[in-house]
Structure formats: structure tokens, C-alpha cells
Amino acid sequence: MGTDSARASATDPDWDVLTRVAAGEGDAFVRLMEHHQDRLLRLCERMLGDVEEARDATQEVFLKVYQKAGDARPQGQVYTWLYRIAVNHCLNKLRRRKLVRFLRWESPAEDSDATPFDPPDAAPDPAAALDSRLRWQSTRRAIAALPDNQRAVLVLARFEGLSYKQIAEVLEISEGAVESRLFRAMRRIEGAQESDASRVSRKEDRR
Amino acid sequence: MSRTTEIELMRLLHGELPAEQAGALRARMAREPELAAAMARLERSWSGLELPPAAPAPPAFAQRVLAQARRQPGLSWSAAPRWARATAAAALAAGLALGVGAGKLVSSRSLPDTENVLAVSAAGGGPSLAETWWDSLDDLESTSTAATDADGAQL
């Protein structure tokens, strides 16, 4: 580590915390988790589309962090490193899910049609609350239909607010690849939103 | 509209376009209604992507994970290097294949001896565990033979 470590610690004090985690300090591990748990939980939830699975995934990610703390190379921000572990873990889970579905002869659409539990909406207007719920459902469906690598880029850009450079760091790809995947993801999203809109208008016509 | 222009629009939307290029693109949008419409469509799609606020971590989440981390053994499967896991998986698969093959070979050679085993046990008192096992195997075989016969009779 040496000079690298000193330079990285200056930019992100969590590298010091991670060094203490590697030395087996439980307090440091708890501190690291409490600092990052909500953002990792949110990321896993966006990636997997399921709250319970996201909790399990976040826990597994932190267990990996505990094991790999000594291998981390201090570079940039700690959360980038954490995001990388979390995204890879979620992508593995998605692949495993696909394999299980394939072995059970289930269609990929079965999962995306399920309505997950949504938290109560703060909007006082019931119509607005219903509208929000429909948008959430439509977004979930659109994200679930994306290929895994496009899904990761979209989630990091739209819901984590990461720049192209940060996404490239997390996924260890070029900025050009980020741009290209995001572009293709948005093409699909637009298509999904259009078909959703036409489905809603067909339903309204029938009434 | 070219893919390059569409990507430029996306970069503009995400604030990733350098100021000079952003200015030039905005000027083009003012002149070209088609470009402005594409930008509006992209903005609509982007802002239409909405999800509810994520659930917070459950209480004492960090403490529970710490407890679990301390329980887990030092060397775990997931912590092992990829090559070690691949080698172990290949060895496991080969062992399994070998085991299944050997099992089939042994069972096919052992079956004719069933009568001898039963004859020995009949001479020497109560049934042993091996006899019970062979009995059940015989039952199974006779059932499948009966089924074949039945099928044959139907044909």
C-alpha cells in the first residue's frame, strides 16, 4: 500500500477504516457497514427488484467485504469498490435466477409480472398515489427486461446518480462502453414505455 | 437521426457533454424541431423511470452481519481463488462421473449373486440388513418386470 494508501486515505477516510477491518476490528466493520449499508441496499434492490433478496444480497456483499478487506487496493473512493462487489454479486444472482428459471421451464416474464410490496405513498391524493404505483411497476418491468449489463449501467446512472466515469470505474469498463450500454438501455426503455402507454390506452378504450 | 447525435443528446441530458459541445447542440436544437422533439422524448423517458424510496436497513443489521462474519470459517469456498474453485469443481464432476460409472458396473455384476446371498441368509437365521436391501431391490425388479409383462400383454 504505502504512498498509494496515504494518498487514498486523504481522499477517502474509509480506506483507513477498511485497513482496520482487514486487521479484524469489529467496530471498524460495523462503522463501515453503517456508513454504506443504505446505499448498497438500495443498489441491490434496484438491481434485483426484490426487497428481501436485496437484504440477503447486501449481507452477502458485506461478508465478502470482510473477507476481502485485506486485498483492497486503495484507489479513489471506497464506495466504488463496494459498488463493484455489490454489482458483481447481483449480476451473479441474476444469472443464477435465470438458470433456475430455465431449469424449471419458466418464462422470463413470470417474475417481472409479480407485483412487489410498495411502501405507502406520501401523496395525499389517491389518484396521484395510484399514478406513482403504476409508474413504479412500469419502471420495474422495464428494468427487468434489460440485459444484465445494461441494467447495471442504467441503475448506476439513473438511481445512484453516478457519472459515466464513476460507472466505468465500478464496472471496470471504458466510458465509451458505459455510453453505449446506456444508449441501448434507453432505446429499450423507450420501447417498453411506449408499449405500456398503448396498453393503458387500449384498456381505457375498452371501458 | 444518427446514433452519434442520439448519444450526444443523452450525454447532454446527463450533463456529460463539454460546455462547448453542449452549446452547439442546444443551438442546433433551436433550429431543428426534430432534434428538439427527440431531446424532449429522451427527457420524458428518463424522468419517467421512477421507483419508490428504497427500504432502510433493518435494525441492528450491521451487528448481525458482524456476528455472522465472525462465525464464518477463515477459508471459505467463495473466498478461494477462481482457479482453485474451477479445479475443485472439475475434480468433483470427474469424481461424480467416476462414482456413477463404478456404481453401475458394480451393481450390474452383483445382481446375479442375489440368490446366493438370500440362500446363505435363509440357512443362517433372521434377515440381515443386506438381505433386506436385496429383498427390496428384488421387489423393485419384479414390479418393473410385471409392468413390462402387462405392457406386453396389452400390445
Image: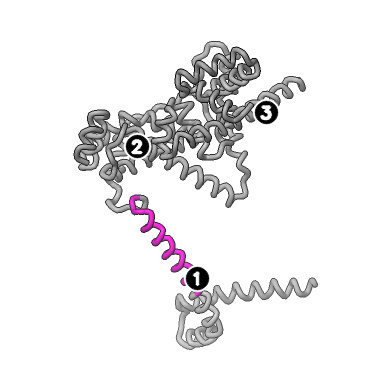
Whether A155 is drawn above or below A120: the answer is below
What segment carries the magenta color?
B79-101
Residue A67 location, x and y as percent? Answer: 30, 45
Q: Which mark is residue A195?
A: 3
Q: Which SS does the magenta portion mostly show?
A: helix
Q: What is the number of the mark on residue A81?
A: 2
* Residue under numbered circle 1: B100
Chain letter belonging to callout 3: A
Q: Relative to A50, is A96 above or below?
A: below
- A30 shown above or below A121: below
Cα distance, mark 2 to mark 3? 37 Å
- Residue neighbourhood size for the residue with mark 3, other residues' Cα within 10 Å, grouped as few (<14), some (14–19), many (≥20): few
Confirm whether circles 1 and 3 share one chain. no
How many numbered markers are drawn? 3
Q: CA distance from mark 1 to mark 2?
A: 44 Å
Give the secondary structure at mark 2: helix
* Residue B86 seen in render: yes
As helix, strand or loop, the secondary structure at mark 3 comes to: helix
Q: Which residue is nearer to you in this view: A96 or B132?
A: A96
Q: In the rendered structure, the residue with mark 2 lies on which chain?
A: A
